[in-house]
Every structure is written in structure tokens, then in C-alpha cells.
Image (tube, rainbow, N blue to C red):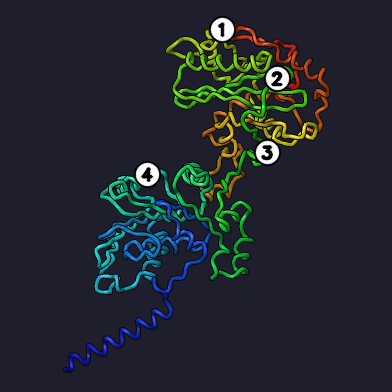
Amino acid sequence: MARDDIDFSEALRRLGEGLQEASHQPNLYDYIPSEKQRLFHLDKNPDRLYIGGNRSGKSLGSTVEAIWWLTHSHPFRETPKGPIRGRVVAVDFLNGVDKIILPLYKQWLPKTYLINGSWEQSYSRERHLLTLNNGSFVEFMSQDQDLDKFAGSSRHFVHFDEECPKSVFQECLARLVDTDGVWWMSQTPVQGMEWIFDDIYIPAKEGKKPIGIVEAEMADNPTLSREAIAKFLDMLPEEERIIRSKGQYVHLGGAVFPDFNPNTHCIPKGQFVPGPEHRIIRTMDSGYTNPTVWLWIAVDEHNNVTVFREHYQAKLNVAEHAAVVNKITKEVEREAGTKVWLTTGDPAIKQTKEHTGTSILQEYQKHGIFIAVDMIPTDRRIGLERIRQYMKFNAKSKRPHLMITDDCPHLIAELPKLKWKKWASVKVAEQNNKLEDIRDRDNHCYDALKYAMTFMADLAPNNTELPTDRTQFHNAFSDAFSPVVPLGDVDDSDDWGSSWKGASDVRSLEGQ
């Protein structure tokens, strides 16, 4: 009898402690989602990307989502029957798992789902595994683990807390195939515009992939004071302020062409046709594993440059590319009523290939395509600055100097993604100036355009050599872009001649 009294008193004491704890620590039953958290939970897409600023509630919403799955208590979607097998991938164990994710599980998972109501009996610190009394479990992993650790048996869901390497993401997705499982990612894009932006965010926003997108700001969290938010953000540089407050994708290296906007720089298909008043330029960037790119450009007397055709293909030989280029060129010349005035491209194609004894330039010659590359400046910034100049508005023609038709989808897709290189770590970046080289990725169309733009007129305000009327325009092109002639078997001379002059004096730009 005394034993029963002791047990009853102990039970009352524990109940009192539990009630006191519940009054300070809300759990799943007290969860009231914010507007953005509710949108995340309601989204019917199988996979979801929850982007938010710091402290916007994305980790809490994602953790509650996982708890609903593990406990079969999801109010908005049906979960698989039987024990649920889940996985959470955090940045690391010390900060990501132990300091962020586990405290959320401890707080919001009701003890009635724990083994004997005990966290200690349910969670294995050695295995980083939380097992519920209904047989469901969730494993906690770190991005810095070896890739083979992410293999193993199937899972019903994976929660990625913050950005992760693409290889880790793909390995985790392989664990979802057997169960037709789902994933969601909660992140503040502090690493900038990386693979998640290109492979997940953009295709989802364009409706090309069935992935739900929820975007939240710090201000969406009703528990944060506006004063505290402002105090925190005032200490950050502008780019990082946008990332951490709004959760927006901003590459910390910065966009190369921030002025480019498809709404103002692009022309719908069929609305531009070159004519005899234009001068046609072909330009190329060579590749094999990476794509070879050819662009067709029309230039008019008002310094308007319109890129209107594109050939973009990998793993073709020169003969195959040449067949396509010649076919498109015939179509262009027939429609425009004029001949191609200049063919230019990557100066590296002059290099002789050891296994053939010829260069790519000479291989194109065999198919009637003669590419002038000697006048391409060695300073890569010249072509870059020309493109940036020509993206500005031309008051005379009421359009940007540079426009692109929708017939060039790869060029249009590349330009907004081009980013400056950035230092490998924040610590190194703080000790150095920003890097001035463009990230060497997905830049093949840009390179082709860059070579042609080195021949365009310098639009700098102090340049007084711009053609001002139709006669000057035609004379400038007649002098500078006379139809190219076959090059010799050995390209060791300047076929343009020492008297070359044109709409843009490239030699002066090179400081010669």
C-alpha cells in the first residue's frame, strides 16, 4: 500500500512537472503555423523548396512537417501506412543537428510518441537516430559526411536543412525511389546562386518541375520585433542583407550583367527579320564535350545589335557543325538579301591539334567557313565592356543597343546566370578585393558574343568616332568588315592588313 502511495505521489509530481514544462515549452498540439508555414504544409507538390531569411520559421515548419509524417498525424496530406523512415540532412552535427534540429524535435514532438515517454530511450546519440514507439524513425546526417554514408535502405522522406552539395542531394534522392518518397528543403541561400537555383528554383518557378516553392522573409515571423530585425540587418552589406532578410537568391560574387532583363532585351520570335540595311556577323565558340556555339548578329546604322539565330550543340565534329552553319547562313542571306560581312570567333581555334596536324580554324576552311580571329583583343574585358555598354538604352532607336530574339534560348538563359568568381571562404573574401574574373561555367554563348562585340563601336561618352549617318555607317563597315577571304594553309599573317580601321578602333583599346 505504501508502495502504491509512493508511486501515486511520484506520478503526481511528474504530472505537475510535465504541465509546468508544457506551459513554457509548446509542442505539436500548440503549433500555430505562420502564413508562409501554412502555405508550405498545404502545398500538394510531392517535393518542396522552402526558402526564407534567417529566423523566418522555415526550420520549425520543416521539422513539424517531419513530425506529422513520423506520427501519421499530417492534417493536409495522406502519409504511407506503417512505420515511416525519414532522414534529415543538416550542415553539420555540432551546429546544424545538435543546436538547431534536435532542440526542435525535443520541443515539438509530444512525449506520448517517445519510447516509454523518454527522449533518452528514443534517441541514440551514437547512431544519430530517433526512434518512436510506433516504429517510425528519423536519422540525422551531416553534409560533411563521406558520400557513401548517404547510401543504404529506402526512406519515405528527406528533409534538407539548408543548402547541400548536389552529390549529397542526388544520393539521398536515390533512397526515395523504392517508396515513391518525397523531399523538402528549408534554406537561406547564403551560398548564393548555386546548383539549387539552376536545377530546382528556376525550373519550379517556370512550371517545368512539380516542385512547390514557398518564399518567406524574416518579417513573416510574428515573434520577431521589427527593431531587432533592423538592428541585425544594419550590420550587413547590401547583398547579404537581401539574402538573410528576404531569403532571395543573390550570388555573393555579383551578377556580371545586372542590367540584362528578358522583358526589355528580348524580342519574340518572328518579330525581327534582318534586311539589306543590316550587316550580318557570324561568331563562334568552339567545344566538343562542352557545346560549340554559333551566333548570327545583325548590326544597323544606329549601333543596334540584334542576335537573331543560334546553333548550340555538343559532341559534333567540325564537319557536322559546318553543315549546320552553312545551311543556316544560306537561309539568313536569302532572307536578309545581303551576305555575311564578318565571321569571327575563339582565337584558340588557331592552335594545331597533335592528332590531326591541323587546327579547328583550318578544318572549318575545308568547308568554306573562313574565321577571322587575329584582331580579337587579348584583354577579355574589352568584349565584356562592349556587351555592358550595348545593354543600355538607345534613345535614337527607342530600344536597347543590344537585343536578342527568342530564337537564341541558350544565350538568353546564360546571360543572367553569369557571375563573378568569388573567394572560397567568407574569411578570405573579407581580406581581399572582389575577384574580377567571370566564373567559367555555362558561358559558351557569352564567349561567342564577346568575340563579335570587340568589333563594335565604343559607346563611351568621350568617343567621337561613332558613325552618325547611313553613309558613314556603310563606309565604316565597308572598310572594317569586307567579306572574309580564304585563309592560307598556315595562318601566320594578319589578313586584315595594317591599315584596318573600323567603327571601333580595337588597336587603341589594346593600348597599341
Of marks 1 and 4, which one's residue comes earlier in the chain?
4
Label 1, label 2: how many angstroms apart (C-alpha)?
A: 35 Å
Say whether residue 408 is left or right of residue 14: right
What amino acid is at disc 4? Answer: Gln
Rounded to the nearest angstrom, the CA distance separating label 1 from label 3 is 44 Å
- Up the image or down, 312 lies above or below 188; here it is above
The label on residue 170 is 4
- Residue type at mark 3: give it: Thr
In this view, the mark in front (4 or 2): 2
Residue neighbourhood size for the residue with mark 4, other residues' Cα within 10 Å, grouped as few (<14), some (14–19), many (≥20): few
Which class describes the residues within 10 Å of circle 1: few (<14), some (14-19), or many (20+)? few
Instruction: Name the quarter where the C terminus is drawn.
Output: top right
Residue 424 in sight in this render: no
**What residue did someone put label 2 on?**
275
Circle on res. 490: 1
Q: Which residue is found at the position 21% from the left and 92% from the top?
A: 5
The residue carrying pointer 3 sits among few (fewer than 14), some (14 to 19) or many (20 or more) residues within 10 Å by Cα, namely some
User: Of 312 and 418, which appears nearest the observer?
Assistant: 312
Q: Amino acid at mark 2?
A: Gly
Question: Which numbered disc covers residue 264?
Answer: 3
Mark 1 or 4: the one toward you: 4
